[in-house]
Amino acid sequence: MNETLPLARPRKPDWLRVRAPMSPEVLATRRLVRRLALHTVCEEAACPNIGTCWQQRHATFMILGDTCTRACAFCNVKTGLPGPVDEAEPARVAEAVAELGLAHVVITSVDRDDLPDGGAGQFVRVIEAIRARAPATTIEILTPDFRNKADTAVAAILAARPDVFNHNLETVPRLYPRIRPGARYYHSLRLLDRVKTLNPTIFTKSGLMVGLGEERLEIHQVMDDMRAAGIDFITIGQYLQPTPRHAPVASFVPPEAFAAYAAVARAKGFLLVAASPLTRSSFHAGADFQRLQAARAAGLAQGAARALA
């Protein structure tokens, strides 16, 4: 009798191996997060860089609870019916930012399709709380797509003046029905275009995962779509299957392929590119923000010099 055996999960190559997140700084960051009853995407999404970031006392805070109304095939955040919005959460996030002494912070959230504003109001309250408690800290937001609420949500958040607006496209359009079934590629693209239309000076950012079965030219086309929407900064990282229930890894993309993607992205005019197997949206976000500012300043200086020539 022949039996179909389950396929073994592919073995991670050496370039994806990271050390376990254990150090006094990691433990201190974990204690802070627990004491203030906060959620981080570092833990909820099983980020491979948690040890590196938490050792540096950096954490990406995930607001609006730990339960998402979507069920994306790549994401480790639990799905279900979320609880009510925690009105005290913005103050606790601001306290954590101040205690950690963060020069730059990334704020993300679960999808909250159950809320009339998709959770935009909580982003605003968190930004305002951080500005009041840690006014020197720059703020990057990584938002959901605010399905059916994008125009009002984007306008409200931009009025609160974040420094970077990030929304990840995640994958190529062909794979959306399987990988991101609750979302629509062109809706996400329009959201980022709307951000740039309303505030041309804000830095916009978006990220892709590779290794899900996409083709190289599909990634190039997404880059073109991003540039047409005015996106400044692209991140590209390797997809890692969080559990056997999630979408399998189709391939482990080697470092040289990431270098090739980065070269193409730079040629297409992105202000900043981060592409490597372990790249994630919020990894090294503070240093990247400084690089974005420097790149914009250099571009303005070059433009002024050409105008005077």
Image (cartoon, rainbow, N blue to C red):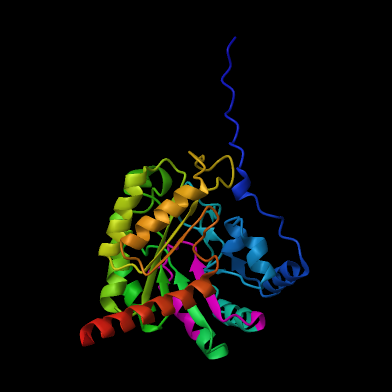
Q: Position of residue 33 (x, y in %)?
A: 67, 71
**On the rendered image, what quadrant is the C terminus found in?**
bottom left
Q: Is residue 107 magenta?
A: yes
Please identify the quarter of the rendering in which residue 193 is found: bottom left
Dividing the picture into quadrants, the one containing residue 213 is top left
User: Looking at the image, is 43 positioned above or below residue 308?
Assistant: above
Residue at 32% across, 47% down: 218
Residue at 41%, 49% in the rendered image: 180
Res. 71 visible in picture: no
Q: How many marks?
A: 0
Would residue 62 be counted in the magenta stretch?
no
Question: Does residue 194 appear left or right of residue 128 in this picture?
Answer: left
Q: Residue at x 67, y 62 (%)?
A: 51
Q: Position of residue 297 (x, y in %)?
A: 37, 82
- Give the left or right position of residue 118, taking residue 1 as reference: left
Give the farthest residue toward the front: 309
In the rendered image, residue 79, in percent from the top left (x then y), is placed at 52, 53
Q: Quadrant of residue 99?
A: bottom right
For the N terminus, the image quarter is top right
Depth check: 219 or 146 in front?
219
Q: 242 or 111, which lies in front?
A: 242
Residue 170 location (% of width, % of height): 42, 54
> Can residue 118 be seen in the rendering of this structure?
yes
Q: Is residue 68 above or below residue 91?
A: above
Q: What range of the chain is rendered magenta?
A: 99-128
Residue at the right extreme, as displayed: 24
